[in-house]
Amino acid sequence: MKPQLLKVPQNPLSSFNVRQDKVPYINNKWHYHIEAELIHFKNGKGTQFIGDHIQNFKDGDVVLVGSNLPHYWRFDDIYFQSDAENCTDIRVAHFCEDFWGTHFLNLPENKGIKILFEKAKRGICVPEPVKEPVAALLEKMLSTDGSRKIMLLVEALLLIAESQFAPLASIGFNHDFKEAENERINAIYNFTLANFKRPIPTEEIAGVANISPHSFCRYFKSRTRKTYSQFITGIKVGHACRHLIEDNISVKQICFESGFQNFASFHKYFKQATGKTPLQYQKQFLAKKPHPKSISKGEG
């Protein structure tokens, strides 16, 4: 289940890389790299895996991934269709934490950034108040050279460091770099994402991983700190969350569309994961959403 080490291409004329990607399959696998990664999903939705944390990502999200933290963004199937109207569009910066010199982070003025890098080793989803400003700074980096480019990165990191964020992966998450299992996690993740709406017998997923059913249960929990059942439930709840805020269908329809076999178990696991009932979750989101009439009135 080892993540794959990727070497980020280096530009000899720049101390760190910033690029725009418009295809959904760039680094579409469980991987890590020595560089920290700051990514903005301008367009694109899917499932996000960072360490042992699973959640949806959506248009507008900004994420900071620390050095050597395994991660994987699986875009929804619609983005892989050749005739799809939806296109992915992301901005991503890769930088070594010490690219500005070994003493920079030890300056007393940079204590906040140093603490941020330490916490980013568990991954950070940039919170709402600073998400758009950080995305705008990342956009500017694409067309900026020289010292200003470094200043933009510092400004983006300071905004995140001063925000109210929470790390994503659990504090005890760890992975074994010595185990030669580069492709197994991709096979497990991809199969589960394609089939989570139906029951997946242990024998079937064990076959995908090419190990015995008894060994699979022990193997999966030792590597992810979750049972496979907990892993699938997390994906189902994330799928339901998206339907609750995006689609005009009943909660009961969402229950079965998300792969739950009955409404009682849907209600139970959803509340365990989110702290709210499905209806409370939906109402809370709608309460934060601007009303069309109030917007048009303000514009007039």
Image: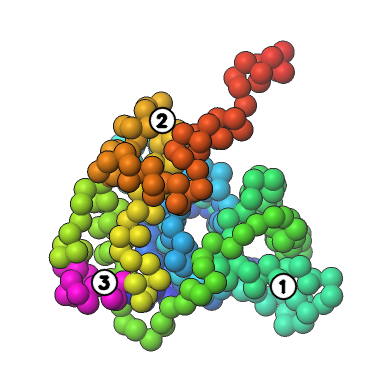
Check disc 1 and give the amino acid type: Lys
Q: Quadrant of residue 284?
A: top right
Res 180 → quadrant: bottom left
Residue on which disc 3 sits: 217
Question: Which quadrant of the figure contains the C terminus?
Answer: top right
Q: Label 3 crowding class (10 Å Cα cut-off): few <14, some 14-19, many 20+?
A: some
Question: Of helix, strand and loop, which one carries label 3?
Answer: helix
Circle nearer the viewer, 2 or 1: 2
To which residue does mark 1 refer?
A: 114
Left or right, 215 with reference to 167: left
Q: Is residue 114 above or below residue 287?
A: below
**Is residue 266 visible to us here?**
yes
Residue 11, image x, y percentages: 57, 69
Give how far across and how far down residue 125 sits, in percent: 58, 55
**Would you place residue 165 above or below residue 133 in this image?**
below
Instruction: Report the Cα–Cα distance between label 3 and label 1.
Output: 38 Å
Is 245 in front, or is 117?
245
Q: Give me the residue at 58% from left, 52% from top.
A: 62
Quarter of the figure with the N terminus: bottom left
Q: Which contiguous range is marked in magenta?
A: 206-220
Q: Which residue is mark 2?
A: 247
Amino acid of disc 2? Asp
Q: Are marks 3 and 1 in contact (CB under 8 Å)?
A: no
Amino acid under disc 3 = Cys
Is 288 inside the magenta-drawn segment? Answer: no
Could you say which disc has been placed on residue 132 in the image? Answer: none
